[in-house]
Amino acid sequence: MSYLDTKGRIFDIQRYSIHDGIGIRTIVFLKGCVLRCRWCCNPESQSYEIQEMRQNNGKIKIVGEDTTVREVMETVEKDRIYYRRSLGGLTLSGGESLLQPEFARDLLHAAKDAGFTTALESMACADYARIEMLLPYLDTYLMDIKHMNGEKHREFTGRENSLMLENARRVAESGQCELVIRTPVIPTFNETPEEIRAIAEFAASLPGVKQMHILPYHRLGYDKYVGLGRPYPMGDVETPSREHMIMLRGVVEKTGLKCIIGG
Amino acid sequence: MAENYNSTPTVKSERITRLVENLYRKMPEIEAARAILVTESYRQTENEPMVMRRAHAFEHILDNIPIIIRDEELIVGSTTLAPRGCQTYPEFSFEWLEPEFDTVATREADPFYISEETKNKLREVHPYWKGRTSSDLATSYMTAETLKAIEHNVFTPGNYFYNGVGHINVKYWEVMELGFEGIIAKIRAEQATMNVGDGDYARKHTLLEAMVISCEAVIRYAERYSELAAAMAKNTSDPARKAELVTISEVCRKVPRKPATSFREACQTFWFIQQLLQLESSGHSISPGRFDQYMYPYYKADLDKGILTRDQAQELIDCIWVKLNDLNKCRDAASAKGFAGYSLFQNLIVGGQTREGMDATNDLSFMCIWASDHVGLPMPSLSIRVWNLSPHALMHEACRLTRTGIGLPAYYNDEIIIPALMNRGIPMDEARDYCIIGCVEPQVGGKTMGWHDAAFFNMCRPLEFVFSNGYDKGEKVSIQTGELEDLRTFEDFWNAYKAQMEYQISLLVNADNSIDQAHAERIPLPWLSCMVDDCIKRGLTTEQGGAVYNFTGPQCFGIANVADSLYAIKTLVYEQKKVTLQEYKQALDLNYGKGFDEFAIRDMTVAVVNELRKSGREVGAADIAQMVENFRNMKVSDELKKKFDDLLEMIEEVPKYGNDIPEVDYFARDCAYLYTKPLEKYKNPRGGMFQAGIYPVSANVPLGQQTGATPDGRLAHTPVADGIGPMSGHDTNGPTATANSVARIDHMIASNGTLLNQKFHPSALAGEKGLNDFESLIRTYFDQKGMHMQFNVVDKATLLDAQAHPEKYQYLVVRVAGYSALFTTLSKSLQDDIINRTEQGFDF
């Protein structure tokens, strides 16, 4: 069986994505996640199960689709000429792609074979062996580090953070791909300069890491929680102001990293 | 290739901010001076050749129309005393204006103030024009069938039917080089080659004399400004302004009589031509074209001599940009909706290639882009030519301007437009030198009478005639292509639509050629023609066939609706057999059970009344009122409603054009051919061919109001799809998918231009990365042989807020199909249309 026939479960494919890696990209969202972040804007990504979600227009949308690498690549191929112009390609996101490591690996493999650049947006919350499988086919790892305090991390995401921090170091030390650290800036969780500085200092200590992205919290997932019949965990928490984000960017840049707001 | 430009940003002078503020202080006003003067002149020249009457009228106007120099202006020449005012042009049409006297100031689209005094003056001169206008003559040339088609809104040739033609680029550069004295010498030299016994002597000699009279009138007009500036300088105590006025006086004494010998003089020459062309002709879309190319030698020489700084040059360019917004035109209420935004479509294009195929970018290419940023107004319709070797630096500045949300520039693809023009018989070096006219129409500047924008053809209407077998509102208005039950296969249906299209296209051609003929006879333009090759030599005005290249370019719109409709019929009726044509017709007639608006009630009433009268019944006002009431209260049964809802759901499931589905997109390509191919075989009276455009300006909204429900699920009287793009809201796979789909239409054959609108939220262009990706998107659409792209970059919330609080958004410019307009000046329905366009690329 060809690696193109590897099966997997996705919940969306988004074209002309320009905020997750170099150039114009197509993002494939894999279904299922290990964390339960309170601010998650893709709550339909969390469960591996195929679900029903009510949309704003009242219609029910089935979330989740079993597919193959070959089928996904048919869509990814459609924007080949845009990748050629912009150095773009395929980005895997989720959910957490590491829950479907063979599928993720084979998607990245197929993209490399097609001549596209590859990126992975992931929390690195899995055995390193799973990550290691992907690295030969991966150009850029956009890795989430949400908090340096393990207990607070557990409280807001459902998991402690030591595995992820360790994996971050191992990916960096492998030298096999570009590693970019990404941090969602979540009021009530990690929005203070001290908390962001701690992450930035950790990121700066990783060999080869040059960039950190800070992503302001937004409420665009709200409708989906309603559609899934779930309460919105963040309540009325306000989004961080532009000024606050710019201040945090300054905090990050003090560590010598380049910092981009919004990725 | 060595870089030939300096891309270091220039500084915006404070003068520009104040010039813009002064320009927009009041609602624009209609003035009567020109109408009075043209009438006075015409009354005295009844027995002269028409071209001579035109010259005398032009001279009479230029010698007597009030002139003004506005505060702080450096470049002078105003058509009206009031800023952004307009004159009227009764020789083209006037009858629409009087009935609108009392509503023109309060109408939704493009209101104008008009004083009681002006109304009275216009009422005095209007009777003279009865039966004498170009529009009267055009009407009498048209066949009864054509008039019927226009009455039933299949197409509207309104542009030139009621107004001047415009839509031209003249040889600004030649006037700068020779001055009008030099042009006159050229005309005299031509006369010297003529013999009084020549067969064309009478015609040609008269035209050449008329040209000389016109050129001399323009020289005198500039002298009036010179004197006014000198007088104002005397009365000014501010020494800085005094010096400026003295310079203005000197410049206007010299140009455009003499050749321009500085950038400043070239700018003033440019402006007098640009302003006065519109005063002669009432045309719009008089397009400066490749301004960065023909102005560059003057700029470069002054820079080298050290008598001009880049910032000074920028200020002069910015001043011209302000002046381009000072010109205005009052159209009838219906046309105003179609061209909404007070736009004169003065298209100015930068970049691209030289005649030798080298990159043409220079300093001025950048400065033109910055000027649009500095001024922040809709004019000029700034465009940029993009080719494989367009410098990234220029594209970057263009994309940055796009990001401001001004809707400028529009991007054009050299790699397709040049071969498309060559396919029309234009040599390569000239094709490389093309510019854009009006909205999106390519032509070779200075030698083409393109008659672009010749009509709006609504592709949905012939589809309605397939369902009605040629009837509309109870009247036979088209050919009969068979009862629905006779359309047994999809091929039958397709052929019926094709036949309806071909018949209506022939009527469209008849309409355009009738108007063409009327302009040649009643409104030849001697002054404009002396600046277009090869009118002097041929002894013909542009209207009479004097230009080297002659075309007629009527544009269609609604391709997306037709493609989605026919594809739905093919799928649901003929393949899946889920619904019959008769059921479909019932759903369309009853607007899918979604109720009737006033338009529908009126149409249905007219149809019934016609039916009754045909059968010999008397129908009185009371009967009609009763019918209207009945239709208004008519309820569709629940059962039918359910059936229609099911149908709408089925239609929604059928794949749509615009989503990167090759099968559907190639089907749409074939639909476009139903318009573009038949047109090619027709000729105009100037000996040129017809060539199709695919763009709507903003006519897709008002003409959509005259279109019933369509089989793609579009409800009656809602907007039709704009340009070559997918139906608003049907494109759900993002901008790359849309671009891929649209590139599958054959743009090359639509050599009168195509138009693709895309709307972006500013976040999609954020940062350097956003700009680079945006540039890649444009270049990739162009790699696929797309022709044109333009963008609205604003967020929905901003637009909604602007709709609710127009006062806060006085200067919000949006791109509306081929041009930029101030959002708050658009009608509500058009605002809604812009807001509803799918927001693309808005990912977090």
Image: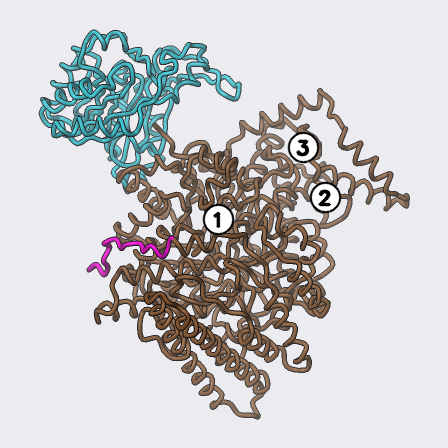
- C-alpha span from label 2 to label 3: 18 Å
For residue B469, the mark is 2
Residue for point 56% across, 74% down: B64
Query: What percent of the width, then of the height, locates residue A106?
Result: 25, 22
Query: What percent of the width, then of the height, locates residue B284?
Result: 52, 61
The quarter of the picture where the C terminus of chain A appears is: top left
- The chain that hosts pointer 1 is B
Residue beneath disc 1: B821
Q: Is residue B137 visible?
A: yes
Upstream in sequence: badge 2 or badge 1: 2
Query: What percent of the width, then of the height, locates residue A199?
Result: 17, 19
Q: Are marks 2 and 1 in contact (CB under 8 Å)?
A: no
**Looking at the image, which is closer to me, B757 or B509?**
B757
Amino acid found under the numbered disc labelled 3: Asn
For residue B591, the mark is 3
Rendered colour, chain A = cyan
Which span of residues is magenta-colored?
Answer: B1-17
Q: Horizontally, is A159 left or right of B789 in the view? A: left
**Image position of A158 with respect to B216: above or below:** above
**Looking at the image, which is closer to me, B758 or A215?**
A215
